[in-house]
Amino acid sequence: FADIASHELKTPLRHISGFADILAEEHEGLLSEEADLCIANITQGVREMQGVIEALLRYSRAKTSESRMQPVDLKHLLGQALRSLERRIASSGGVVDVDWQSLPTVRGDPVLLKQLLENLIWNAIKFSQPNPVVRVSASRDLLDWVISVEDNGPGVEPEHREYIFQMFKRSRVDVEGSGIGLALCKKIVGIHRGKIWVEDGSGPPERRRALFKFSIPARVREEISQH
């Protein structure tokens, strides 16, 4: 259903975008400033709608099977995620600081876990402008590995901390996004039988920062190899 709906929604969007591009290319400067602004708003709206459709597709396709569960080295996987985000991180002026030695090997779906890490890191950068700094680390408790992604942004108000993991819910409308990214993160973590939450970071009270954490059941290497 998601694939069919995506195709049916993308086709008229391509038509709208194509005609808007023609207007922009052939008539820019010949119309009023207000008309040029309207054309630009149409093009921007199409891009945003295309982003929502792609995010919905990613959400609907986020599933796995036992055959895809395998030992996943989070050091290697995070390296892949950072390479995928490299251009966007550079254009944002952001810095990602990783405690590489703390990252474990877990049992999971590498495709979904990579998507999870990318979403959390890019979300942290978007909400920490200007000069974003993101720190990634891991720790072990009795039953789980806990992966932390902390930013230097303004933090998340307590009343929004459950709200932001729901579909289409956003704590700030001034930051570009589909409202699906954190819902996708929650779904992926749930598939791995873990939990995800956000709490205050290490900053001062007036700038608390956001500290996102998710858990994955811990497995020693011998247990992983048996799967």
Image: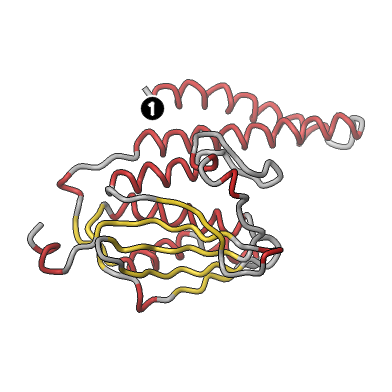
Along the line of sight, which residue is nearer the eye, 74 or 5? 74
At 64% across and 61% down in the image, what residue appears? 153
Q: Quadrant of the N terminus?
A: top left
Residue matched to label 1: 3
Q: Is residue 127 above or below residue 17?
A: below
Q: Is residue 135 above or below residue 200?
A: below
- Side (left or right) of 87 relative to 66: right
At 36% across and 50% down in the image, what residue appears? 195
| Label 1 Cα crowd, 10 Å radius (few <14 / some 14-19 / many 20+) | few
Along the line of sight, which residue is nearer the eye, 30 or 75? 75
- Side (left or right) of 149 relative to 142: right
Q: Secondary structure at mark 1?
A: helix
Residue 7 position by quadrant: top left
- Side (left or right) of 129 relative to 28: left
Residue 172: % across, % down: 67, 44
Residue 171: % across, % down: 63, 43
- Side (left or right) of 52 relative to 57: right
At 49% across and 57% down in the image, what residue appears? 212
